[in-house]
Image (cartoon, rainbow, N blue to C red):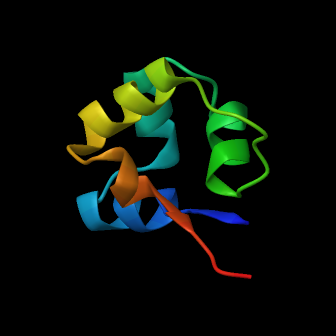
Amino acid sequence: MPIEVKLEDMLHERRMTMTELAERVGITLANLSILKTGKAKAVRFSTLDAICRELDCQPGDLLGRIDD
């Protein structure tokens, strides 16, 4: 059950850079990049909440399930 992270699409829609989002959320660019590429093993709800707050979206807008 792979999970798709649609962070890049959301950033593009909002015309925001990864650096800008990382600064607003308070996480490192490296950790945000790991999340964006789908290599993260987990994400804290507080981080997900902060990203959603800054991108004005819902968690379901950022994450999706890919059928096998």
Residue at 49% in and 24% down: 45
Q: Position of residue 24 (x, y in %)?
A: 37, 25
Q: Is residue 55 left or right of residue 8?
A: left
Q: Is residue 9 left or right of residue 18?
A: left
- Determine whether 27 is above or below 7 in the image: above
Which quadrant, please, contains the N terminus? Answer: bottom right
Q: Is residue 43 left or right of residue 1?
A: left
- Determine whether 24 is above or below 14 in the image: above
Q: Quadrant of residue 48?
A: top left
Q: Position of residue 11 (x, y in %)?
A: 38, 57
> Nearest the camera: 24 or 47?
47
Which quadrant, please, contains the C terminus? Answer: bottom right
Q: Quadrant of residue 32?
A: top right
Q: Position of residue 55 (x, y in %)?
A: 28, 44
Residue at 26% in and 32% down: 53
Q: Residue furthest bottom?
A: 68
> Nearest the camera: 1 or 24?
1
Residue at 70% in and 58% down: 37
Q: Residue furthest left?
A: 56
Residue at 35% in and 58% down: 61
> Nearest the camera: 27 or 19?
27
Q: Position of residue 34 (x, y in %)?
A: 73, 44
- Determine whether 30 is above or below 59 in the image: above
